[in-house]
Each structure stands twice: as C-alpha cells, then as structure tokens.
Image (spheres, rainbow, N blue to C red):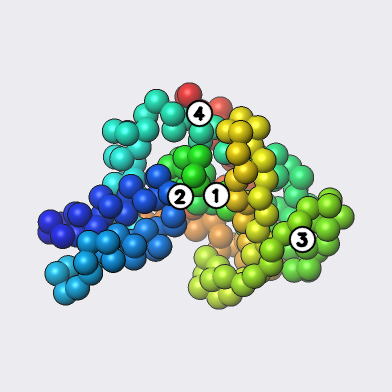
Amino acid sequence: MDSYKEEITATAARLVVEEGLDYGAAKRRAAKQLGSGARGGLPDNAELEAAVEEYIAIFCADTQPTELRALRELALHWMDRLARFRPHLGGAVWRGTATRHSDIYLQLFCEDSKAAEIALINMGVRFEARSVPGFQGALVDALSVHVRSEALQENIGLHLMVYDQDDIRGALQPDARGRSPRGDADALRRLMENTPL
C-alpha cells in the first residue's frame, strides 16, 4: 500500500472508531482532510477493517470490549422485541469493531414491509423512515430510532433495515474472508458467550 493510501486508511480508521462513521463516509472524509487528488486510491473495506481493528487494539483496548458488550446486549434486547421479523445483526456490532460511537444495524425480514412500522407504532416508538441501499444494492426501507443504553449512559442509533422475507437467503452468504456478515439472535448469544470481556 502506498503512503498516501496508508494515511487515508489510518485517518479513516480513526474516524470510524472515534466518530462512528460508516466505512464509505470515513474514507471520503479522510480523503478530503488529506487533500484528495490523483495521488492514490481509497482503501477497500477489508484494508479499512484491518486498520480499525489495529486502532482499537492500540488506543481502545481497555474500553472497547465493555462498550461492544453493551451494544450487543442492547441489540439482543431489540432482536427479542422484534423476533417475529427474523432480525439479523450486521455491521460493526456484529463484527466486533464497535465502540460507544457505533450505531446498531438490524436487518428485518418481513412478509409485509409496513408490518415493522406498525409494530414500532404499537410499541410507542418514534422512528424516522427513509430509503437506503440494502446489502444487495437495491433501495430498502430503513427505520431509525434512538434507544437508551443504560450501560453506556447515552442514546444509541438503531437502524432497522426492512427486507422481503425471501431476501434472507442471500443475507447469510459469507464474505471474502469466509465470515457470516450478519447473525440472528441465537448466533449473537453464542458470539457473546465466546467473547471475553
């Protein structure tokens, strides 16, 4: 990796960990901060993920495991509340690179896309609805709420991505490193049992 790309990667990793930016936004902001140009390309997600893991190991080793545990517990609470929609956890909370600045991303698989909205309304939960690119590139509904983490003593962004029920087949395809990109509540419980604090 050339030195410019290494700088972009290191800066983007810091933005992911310290500000909770997603990978795309972190890479774009890092390039802008460092003066983007024809000097080199942006890192791919695997390179950035490795840099995020390294940043956490160096600067956050004493706090990140506890913060990750709190986020996973909060995610599991919401997965249990929304169990009828077959929720799957993805993103940094699933991969283990989340900090208190990270949002929680749950994918819901519904027969009726409005059913999740109705469930939130019935729970008395306020949400913001919008459309975002899904894991296969097509636009999906995203329902965003702020939920309280008592363990972290702050509000956390919770994003519910609403997919068709049949989309679950493609959701569990392993990534380039052979890892599952998301998991259901049982998989998250097993992960938490096997992750030391």
| Residue 179 in view, yes or no | no
Q: Which residue is mark 1?
A: 103
Q: Earlier in the sequence, mark 2 or mark 3?
A: 2
Within 10 angstroms of label 3, few (less than 14), some, or many (20 or more) residues?
many
Q: Which residue is mark 4?
A: 66
Q: Nearer the viewer, residue 98 or 111?
A: 98
Q: How far, Cα to Cα, is label 1 from label 4?
A: 15 Å
Label 2 secondary element: loop
Q: Which residue is mark 3?
A: 116
Q: How far, Cα to Cα, is label 2 from label 3?
A: 26 Å
Amino acid type at circle 4 is: Thr
Within 10 angstroms of label 1, few (less than 14), some, or many (20 or more) residues?
many
Label 3 secondary element: helix
Which numbered disc covers residue 142?
A: none
In the displayed structure image, the side of residue 26 where residue 138 appears, left or right = right
In the displayed structure image, the side of residue 153 where residue 114 appears, left or right = right
Q: Nearer the viewer, mark 4 or mark 2?
A: 2
Q: Nearer the viewer, mark 2 or mark 3?
A: 2
Q: Which residue is mark 2?
A: 20
Q: Do residues under tags 3 and 1 come within 8 Å of each other at their CB atoms?
A: no
Q: Earlier in the sequence, mark 4 or mark 2?
A: 2
Q: Position of residue 49 (x, y in %)?
A: 34, 50
Q: Do residues under tags 2 and 1 come within 8 Å of each other at their CB atoms?
A: yes
Q: Nearer the viewer, mark 3 or mark 1?
A: 1
Label 1 secondary element: loop
Within 10 angstroms of label 4, few (less than 14), some, or many (20 or more) residues?
some
Amino acid type at circle 2 is: Gly
Q: How far, Cα to Cα, is label 3 from label 4?
A: 30 Å
Image quadrant where residue 121 sits: bottom right
Amino acid type at circle 3 is: Ala
Q: Residue at x 65, y 58 (%)?
A: 144
